[in-house]
Amino acid sequence: MIDRRSLLLGGAIASIARPALSQTKYPNRTVTMVNPFAAGGQLDPIGRIISKHMQSVLGQAFVIENKPGAGGTIGAQYVTRSAPDGSTLLLGTTSTFVIAPYIFKPQPYDPLVNLAPIIALTENATVLIASEKSGFKSLKDLLEAAKQKPANVTVASAGNGSFPHVFSELFCSLTDVKLTHIPYRGGAPAMNDLIGGQVDIFFEVAPTAIPQIQSKTAFPLLVSGNKRVPLLPDVPSAAELGYPDLNLTSWVGLAAPDGTPASVVEILNKESNAALRSEEMTTYLDRLGISAIGGSPREMAERMARESAIYKRLVESKGITVQ
């Protein structure tokens, strides 16, 4: 028997292979890349470099439009309902492609059905950082405090159902501790309160956490995954500390509405890969310790199917929902 996930993956991949609907040169008008989050996050600079390259090579304007709200689902849903002609694209994150759709009720969109994957662009480790006022200088300090007084330690997130929220739930499951979740309307206000000592810890992507660590306004306890981050050589990995399953990464990808012609997806994939290899992009990524991914639309579709299954199980087991 063929399970539903296989059918959905087949649909996502099939959408990549559909024949072009017309022979009109692409693009023949302005292309909008929708960022489903507020301005100021990690998507903005990556999107600017990608759009700048596209515009210079393809000869049409590529503009970024922020459509934040409801954990990124408002912007993502807008794209899924747009014409599948390549004029509206989705520049999203792990949350956009494999988490948020399964948290909000009713489900706003199905990423494996309603989106045509173009490319997985970048990924980076997540850093567990603590407020200087918390007094935590190691994972051991945090776990001891959390076990002595369950739910006394507070953990910030960028909102219910956000990547930091779900990651913190995974952390609690693996370490057998209880934390009090404090959701914010984005990563920036969460970081501000961590720095101010209003919350104890925060799971944040490395590019955003590193400047705070370097300025000593936050203290790193671990980085996710099986190896250390080059820009944080003294911070142990989760695997070193005995939690190898704490290895999920935050990644950025580009997608289009389902039904977008294969020829359009091919052009966007080709030029996105070229943009990832550009000097401007490699300089930016190296400076912040972000890794380029690249590859084919099929590889992004497979990543989405694989990670959707992981996060969906976690969301259901923890009862994480947003009405």
Image (cartoon, rainbow, N blue to C red):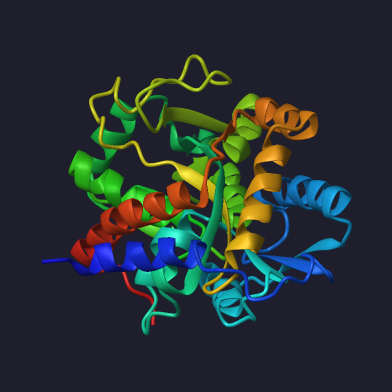
Quadrant containing the N terminus is bottom left
274 is higher (above) or lower (below) than 303:
above
Residue 156 vs residue 25, the one in the foreground: 25
Q: In the displayed structure, does residue 61 sit left or right of residue 44?
A: right
Please state the horizontal and vertical placement of residue 49, each as a whole percent of the image. 77, 45
Quadrant containing the C terminus is bottom left
Residue 135 vs residue 189, the one in the foreground: 189
Q: In the displayed structure, does residue 247 sit left or right of residue 199?
A: left
299 is higher (above) or lower (below) than 281:
below
Please state the horizontal and vertical placement of residue 207, each as a whole percent of the image. 61, 36
- Seen as rendered, the residue at the extreme top is 234
At a point 89% along the width and 57% down the height, the residue shown is 59
At a point 87% along the width and 61% down the height, the residue shown is 60
Please state the horizontal and vertical placement of residue 310, each as a whole percent of the image. 27, 53
At a point 43% along the width and 68% down the height, the residue shown is 111
Q: In the displayed structure, does residue 42 sit left or right of residue 194?
A: right
At a point 77% along the width and 65% down the height, the residue shown is 26
Residue 323 vs residue 275, the one in the foreground: 275
- Seen as rendered, the residue at the extreme front is 23
Please state the horizontal and vertical placement of residue 134, each as a whole percent of the image. 45, 37
